[in-house]
Image: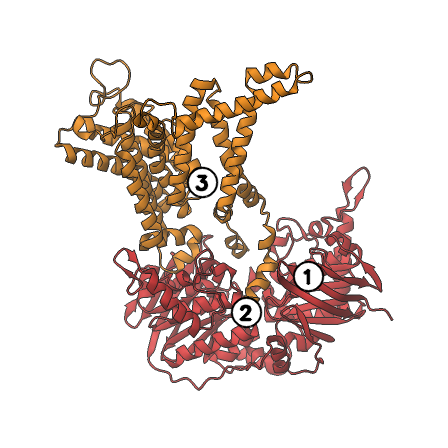
Chain colours: A red, B orange
Amino acid sequence: MLAKLQLRGITKRFGSLVANDRIDLTVEQGEIHCLLGENGAGKSTLMNVIYGLLQPDEGEILVDGEPIVCHNPADAMAAGIGMVHQHFMLVPVFTVAENVMLGAEQTYGPDFLDIDAAREQVREISARYGFHVDPDAVVENLPVGVQQRVEIIKALVRDAHVLILDEPTAVLTPQETDELIEIMRQLKANGTSIVFITHKLREVRAIADRITVIRLGKVVGEPDVSASESELASLMVGRAVTLAVDKEPPDVGDVVVDVRGLTVVDERDYIVVDDVSFDVRAGEILAVAGVQGNGQTELTEAIMGLQRRATGSVLLGDVELLGKSVRSVLRAGVGFVPEDRKVDGLVGDFSVAENLVLDRHDQAPFASGPMLKPAVIRRIAEDSIAEFDIRTGSGATLARTLSGGNQQKVVIARELSRPLRVLIAAQPTRGLDVGSIEFVHSRIVAERDKGTAVLIVSTELDEVSAIADRVLVMYRGTVVGVVPGDTDRDVLGLMMAGVPADEAAERARQHHTLIEGLAAGEDGDE
Amino acid sequence: MSENASNELTVGQRFFRELTTGGTALTLLSILLAMLIGAVLIVVSDPDVQGTAAYFFSRPTDTLLAIWESASSAYSAMFAGAIIDFDAASVGDALIPLADTLTYATPLIGAGLAVALAFRAGLLNIGAQGQILIGATLAGLVGFGMDLPAVVHIGFAVLAGFIGGAIWGGIAGFIKAKTGAHEVIVTIMLNHIAALLLAYLLTTQLFRREGQAAPISPFVADSAALPRFFDGSRLHLGLFVVLLAAVYSWWLLSRSTMGFRFKAVGHNPHAATTAGISVGRSYTAVMFIGGGLAGIAGASQVLGTESYLSTSIAGELGFDAITVALLGRSSPIGTVAASLLFGALRAGAVTMQAQTGTPIDIVLVVQSLIVLFIAAPPLVRAVFRIKVRAASPMAAEVGGKTA
């Protein structure tokens, strides 16, 4: 039988860079084919070639054994290839049905839109796969997971037999991820082939029928689906990696940060952090777990002095931080790794060296009076680049040209290069590859071992389980509970959906897998 | 979804990035191309060429000759008027055109720096005009209204010019910092207020020249006048003052902690805030300093070039300043170079019109074309989000990896 989709020797160059080097890939009918690789390995380039967004320099694409040439996504769709991008291509103010028909509008009479037909299609597909999508809902009001299903419906309406999912789980809660996996299984049962791009090993192991690993633009292996996570990781990174973080039990000291009754109101007048109290002790890592958008971001920002409308108390030792400027908070010995490094962490058009002194540029030894000391900045930058293994040409390289992992290393290097009493890191490994995650985690643990109180915000259960000494779970701005770091993942997942710790433990005992899917993430998002 | 929004650069930020990533070669090519198109216009508007074109098919050489004659004589007249006049009686006279060029460039440098500095902090300072006017007003008031010893008087008058412009710019920066009101709107409004304020002041006892019906001020005292270098030209000490300002601006942007903050705020206010840099304070400071430099330009006009205040003291300087800062890619050195170019075009245009009858408007067209060629492509790219091929995200992704 002919393969559904076959790539033969696809090569794509950007100038002197070979983004895809003679890549062969075969996807059978009704197969879930995982494409695994680090950020920058060339996965997205390859998918953009298949989807007609880029033209290959060499090689050919075959669908059902027939060579096809896609000059644009319309050609790809005509050939039965659909793609769900990492960033959704939906019109937020349109309804689901309107989004689905956009670009493939059905009309009747002279030129009237047949919205009813589109509604019917959405209902039909939604029922067939159990999507639970209302065709008349406005997209911007839907949770991320449901928006993703709308994207899938869009592809299915256009008769996609091959569905490309580009890092679909990056934006989902654990429960939404389970639901997506269930949907993928049903699509597969209906004969749809799926190319599933990810760098999360757990998901690969859960669903893949076949795995192809790409590194630096080349296919480096097609491991068996029974391969262990560490085998997959080392194939992906090109060397052995330790997935678990090496750490000793914490040597916990006194309370360093004491947060009492912290409440934050955002610019829309919503209470986003609601009477939150906790403490962090010297030498321990407290992880704040929760689905994206449940107040964790605002919590860290309030401590840093970045949220204006915050009330309550944040004591560092016996100094009140709330109401102080960002500058004073930083000077008090708080290190901060913001959630979005590109927006809040780095000045992209500044050099690596300049970014390394961004929050200390006016202090000795980097400045004397109003004068910068460029030579000192350069020299110390070289030290940091060496110590933190930042892969850059030199300290003069612009930060925005670095890969995500190296950008994050710049932010971490900056914050860890001064004496800290507290380190606050929000999503410190988001979007990073396995190798960088390993590095960032080990540095955070090292900082803890120096006796610094560490507060981590993470939406990734893997990360929380790996490095937390204690876990605080947030849901809709409130604290669901504080549990030990080795708490079962299922329990944490349920707590992230707002289930109190005791009840979560009870329910997790009853059914140990989370494939059932709880609708919890859905209301958690709005 | 708000996260997506904050990821997006504003049109202004993208424009700035596009503008500053272009090379010097692009600038030079734009100037050359603009001059070529200018030549076409000169030729087309020349009656000699039109005359010979009537019998082009019987004697084409006549037309071609007339074309060459027309374009070359216009541009050589311009050169003679802007740089060196080889027909002059003495060496001193031969350099008068160059002095004229520098005279025209002087206020442009000061005002151009005002726009360039603000641009580096992410602000579009459309208010150089108003800052020049208020600077000139205060400098003039000190110049003709006070009685001080020679050197002190000059210094004090220039300082008054700086303070006037700084306050006018600082107001815009402060309003932006405190209320978030867009600086373009605020500075445009302040321009109107400054113009009308000066027009009003010139009708008052304090400012009006005695025995004059026209709204002009008395001449500034000799002790406050910026000394001129030689007879036959209005070139004066103000040139060195604005060059000092350019050196200061360079130092500020590349060597000072304050300039570091300005640039950080200009490139990424979010990251600057997170690093403990006060964005509002930077906005106010950069508009204060920039406004002050525009104020110095105003002082140089009233104390040097014109010697008295009138409603037309600033001419179109404030708007040419924007052009000059764009052309100079918002760097102090570039701004000085662009100001010299514009000064030369301006000085040359006068001679060109006198000698060859080519309308002076041609030069305005050439100036506008230069700006169009340089500013338009990045603007188009910024507005329509067109990516330069080499900088495609895929390439960057892979590039970052292998680098």
User: Residue under circle 1?
Assistant: A12
Q: Nearer the viewer, residue B62 or B168?
A: B62
Q: Is residue A117 left or right of residue A258?
A: right
Q: Nearer the viewer, mark 1 or mark 2?
A: 1
Residue A85 position (above or below residue A236):
above
- In the picture, measured across the screen, residue B258 lies left or right of residue A209, that is left
User: Where on the picture, by quarter, is residue A154?
Assistant: bottom right
Q: Residue at x 53, y 37 (%)?
A: B373
Three-letter amino acid code at the position of disc 1: Lys
Q: CA distance from mark 1 to mark 2?
A: 24 Å
Q: Chain of mark 3?
A: B
- Residue B45: percent from left, percent from top: 55, 19
Q: Amino acid at mark 2?
A: Leu
Q: Residue at x 65, y 20 (%)?
A: B60
Q: In terms of depth relative to the viewer, which is nearer, B127 or B159?
A: B159
Residue depicted at x 54% and y 22%: B69
Percent position (x, y) of residue A115? 75, 47
Residue holding disc 2: A432
- The residue singled out by tag 3 in the image is B326
Say which amino acid is labelled 3.
Leu
Badge 2: chain ID: A
